[in-house]
Amino acid sequence: MATTHTPGPWTAEADKNSVTIRAAAKSAHALGWEIASVYNEDIDDLTPTMEADARLIAAAPEMKDALALPLLFHAGGEWSGAKRATWKRVTGTDEATTKVMCDTIRAALRKATEPA
């Protein structure tokens, strides 16, 4: 069963005691679609765990795409227009190498684990 999600990129926007995860705004005047919020009504300040959870959620679209790259790269068969288009959309380049694949995976992991 195929499902769709709100396209990335998603961002994590922190305030005093919560982090809101948003999809990219469709215009300069919009805030973007709210995907999720990380908060705890019993505390007054963000905790490192709350911030880490928000980063992980915000990185989900990039991580999903990055995890699909090894399967695309090693799928065999002709390197078709559809495969090439998916590769370029995810990596930003036509260069289909293991280095590009690993760099894309590393970037997704950094977004999920390192503070902005």
Image (cartoon, grey):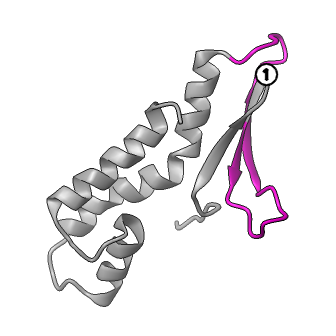
In this view, the residue in front, 100 or 37, is 100
State the count of labels: 1
Quadrant location of residue 70? bottom left
First to last magenta residue range: 20-46
- Residue lying farthest bottom? 81
- Circle 1 sits in a helix, a strand or a loop, which is it? loop
- Residue 81, image x, y percentages: 31, 89
Disc 1 packing (10 Å; few <14; some 14–19; many ≥20) = some
Residue 9: image location, x then y, percent:
57, 57
Tell me if 34 is positioned left or right of 55 in this view.
Answer: right
Residue plotted at (72% across, 42% down): 36
Q: Where in the figure is residue 14, as x and y percent of width and height?
A: 72, 32
Q: Looking at the picture, how far across and down is residue 104, in whole percent?
A: 32, 55
Q: Is residue 58 above or below residue 15?
A: below
**Residue 24 shown in magenta:** yes
Magenta segment, prevailing SS (helix, strand or loop): loop
**At 43% from the left edge and 50% from the top edge, which residue is drawn?**
63
Task: Indicate yes or no whether the magenta region holds residue 45.
Answer: yes
**Res 110 quadrant in image:** top left
**Position of 66 compared to 11: left or right?**
left
Which residue is farthest top? 43
Label 1 belongs to which residue?
17
Q: Is residue 31 above or below residue 39?
A: below
The correct choice, above or below, for 110 with respect to 82 in the image is: above
Q: Amino acid at mark 1?
A: Asn
Determine the residue positioned at 65% across, 61% down.
6
Name which residue lies at 58% across and 44% down: 58
Q: Is residue 20 above or below residue 11?
A: above
